[in-house]
Image (spheres, rainbow, N blue to C red):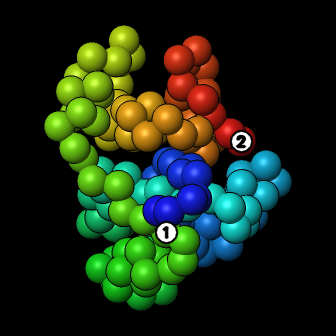
Amino acid sequence: MGSHAVIVCDTHTWLWWAVEDARLSSVALAALDDERDCIGIPAISVWELGMLAAKQRITLTVPVDEFVHRVLARQPVQLLPVSPEIALAGSRLPIHGDPGDRLIAATAIIHDAPLITADAQLQALPFLRTLW
């Protein structure tokens, strides 16, 4: 990552960014276009995207595997693995909900990074920095 700060993307954020979806807010788009930042994609959100494709809840113009690899090859995108610290932080978060959200929030917390998300439940967490 070098001197770049990290911004962490929720699953819908990096999907919408990759397909240039108009649902991205102007704040989110500006953060994603800031060349000083590394765009962090939590590994769990790759799984979430795969599940959405498998359940046919999203439609992509290429197979999901190809789509993911294309996004991950873009600069300055970085895959953020689920480390033991992230896994444990996610298990301790005082939030209810799906494990994906817990691990995405924990990824942002452990990386001391803002989370770009339209998810109102995540935005409402006082201990999580969010952008939208």
The residue carrying pointer 2 sits among few (fewer than 14), some (14 to 19) or many (20 or more) residues within 10 Å by Cα, namely some
Check disc 2 and report the residue beneath it.
132
Q: Residue at x 71, y 42 (%)?
A: 132
Could you tell me which secondary element the residue under label 2 belongs to? loop
Q: Residue at x 34, y 18 (%)?
A: 93
Visible in this render: residue 6?
yes
Seen as rendered, the residue at the extreme right is 26
* Circles 2 and 1: CB atoms closer than 8 Å: no
Residue 119 rendering spot, x and y as whole percentages? 57, 36
Residue 117 vertical placement versus 121 (above, below): below
Residue 17 rendering spot, x and y as whole percentages? 62, 66
Could you tell me which secondary element the residue under label 1 belongs to? strand
Amino acid type of the residue that numbered disc 2 sits on in the rendered structure:
Trp
Visible in this render: residue 52?
no
Q: Residue at x 50, y 62 (%)?
A: 2
Q: Residue at x 46, y 76 (%)?
A: 71
Q: Which mark is residue 77?
A: 1
Residue 107 rendering spot, x and y as whole percentages? 38, 40
User: Looking at the rendering, which quadrant does residue 114 occupy?
Assistant: top right
